[in-house]
Image (cartoon, rainbow, N blue to C red):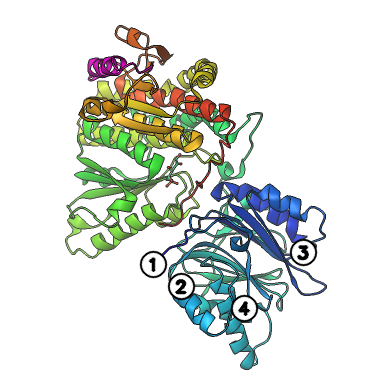
Amino acid sequence: MKKIICMCGIVAVTGYKKALPLLINGLEKLEYRGYDSAGIAVINPDTKNIICNKAEGKLTNLLNNISNKHIHGTVGIGHTRWATHGKPEVKNAHPHIDSSGKVAVVQNGIIENYQELKDKLEKEGIRFNSDTDTEVIPHLIQKELLALNKLNLEKNGSTLLVALRNVISDLEGSYALAVLWADAPDSLVVARKQAPLIIGLGEGEFICASDTPAIANFTKIILPLEDEEIALLTPLGIEIYDSNNERQYRNPIHLHVSEQVIDKKDYKHYMLKEIYDQPDTAKYWIEKFLFKDSKTGQYQIDYPFDTEFFESIERIEIVACGTSKHAAMVGSFLLEQFSGIPTNVFYASEFRYSPPPLLPNTLTIGVTQSGETADTIAAINMEIKRRSSMSDEKYKPNLVAITNRMESSIGRQISNIIDIGAGVEIGVAATKTFFAQLLSFYGLAIKFAQIKGTQNNEIINQLISELTKLPPLIEELLEKHNKTSEKLAHDFFNIKDVIFLGRGINYPIALEGALKLKEISYIHAAGYPAGEMKHGPIALLDKKVPVISIATPGVVFDKVISNAQEAKARDSYLIGIAPECKGTEIFDYLMMIPETNEWISPLLAIVPLQLLSYHIAAHRGLDVDQPRNLAKSVTVE
Ligand code: F6R
């Protein structure tokens, strides 16, 4: 079956205030989730009609469309879309409306059986206006409403709730939905299944959104909808029901402070600001997770799980995607080489369909900054399911999640959680959250090494001491390399291919450097373990292909330098991410990093690479924060 994949951001409001400004503010904050098209629908309180407006491309196009229109209803829904199927055209933009014009729907997710439902509706004479999966929903709701009308149910929000509940029982896939019905003009019905939806509670009004930044300006009190829940919202209150139609009552929660701050300050792009946030990211980790035991004088890691939890673990499996996978690879290196625990890292999307055989006493770690990546969540769920079914205690699930979003699906699902606390990241390319994920792994590696006794106190203290020095070191690197990378970007903004090399603990940094460059500058880049070059990729090299080599003193330093020599012999321009020391004179250009303990070198090497990618993309005049075809949270497989 062909899938329409839509990650998207949705926002919906009901209350006494004008809906439009709240919708627009929410959509602006959600644009990082997709920016192929945007749309809003508001119920006109006078005519009881739905006013809908949509535009292709970014939100500004929608704003231009509606700038001189008077849209003054208090109940509305909005959407910003990311699609890979079909062109991002106005007809495919949300909201989607049924043939009577009375029901409007926005959706985030994917309706897997939409074709079957669509075929059926078409046979019944319904005409479709879009190529999306979503459009089946308003038509199905309208059909249900007609059926309920025959039962003499009143035209109000409760009836809409019943209609949507009946419809979602026929939907396969994942979704977060918000629905308006012109005949119930103060009501909003929302539902979710494997896609996030959070309700913000204001005074006499409610705003629902895919993510907290869309809510933060409006209220600090939120109620995340749980999986498979459905809710009716009116200015008078909320009714939430679970999948068994049981009414749910629970206390709202307060928004995390870091969830509320979205400020670009004076930076040209969020990405640059977020690169510059990294000294604070390091400070946060040091203050939150490192403490000195007053009796022993020894530093300890304060992760929220007890010692017994670590003692029983014999091996670790990590699931993650994209940049989070690269952080997990550094983590795996540390956990094996520093703490002595056999560790494997998997792409979450691969793990789901080819999981390794079950082994006892295994810790499964899910790494996801957004906490919403569908493949990572599905991989974790699968692991919970297959391990929970085992009778032997040794095979039961042991889980840890590393996330930046405690309110996210993973944050609410898993109790052993490391909150990386990097603050909301708006740039689609992950920077400070990668840095914070790395730090979380240093903490885990130290904790395991202490508990398992795989390193002596002196070595552990030395590593901890290096970690405490990070904030000023990162500040210096930013100071030094913002200008140097801008200059390099001027020379290299037109290149077509770049090769990144690293070995050992810095091989994942080569992969991450390449990912950063390609995703925001659209320049082809590939990362390799430096020793692999001669087994094929070296054929790519000539004077048009620069090589960026991470060469930090340690076990493989001499090897990396000889691999760089091999590239130089093929006329490649060589950029070194390395200290100024014997051997690094071979680089045509040195992006200097300080000489430190090899274990912490990834935390330093990544900074110049982030800056270089940023400046190359900015120099090319590209939309650094919202690169084409990407979105910040990938909520579908
Ligand atoms: C790249 C990037 C993506 C994400 C990936 C996983 O800069 O941001 O590769 O790392 O989509 O996202 P999370 O960490 O939210 O699971």
Q: Nearer the viewer, residue 440 or 269?
A: 269
Q: Which mark is residue 1?
A: 1
Q: Are marks 1 and 4 in contact (CB under 8 Å)?
A: no
Q: Are marks 2 and 4 in contact (CB under 8 Å)?
A: no
Q: Which three-letter amino acid code belongs to the residue tagged 4? A: Leu
Say which residue appears at 25% left-offset and 62% top-offset.
386
Q: Comparing marks 1 and 4, which lies closer to the viewer?
A: 1
Query: Residue at label 4?
Result: 160
Q: Earlier in the sequence, mark 2 or mark 4?
A: 2
Q: Mark 2: which secondary structure?
A: helix
Separation of residues labelled 2 and 3 (CA atoms): 39 Å
Q: Are marks 4 and 3 in contact (CB under 8 Å)?
A: no
Q: Quadrant of the C terminus?
A: bottom left
Q: Which mark is residue 115?
A: 2
Q: Verify whether residue 563 appears in magenta.
A: yes
Query: Residue at label 3?
Result: 16
Task: Residue 22 in the image: state x and y as whole percent.
Answer: 71, 55
Q: Is residue 362 left or right of residue 475?
A: left
Q: Comparing marks 4 and 3, which lies closer to the viewer?
A: 4
Q: Mark 4: which secondary structure?
A: helix
Q: Verify whether residue 573 appears in magenta.
A: yes
Badge 2: residue crowd in 10 Å (few <14, some 14–19, many ≥20): some
Q: Earlier in the sequence, mark 1 or mark 2?
A: 1
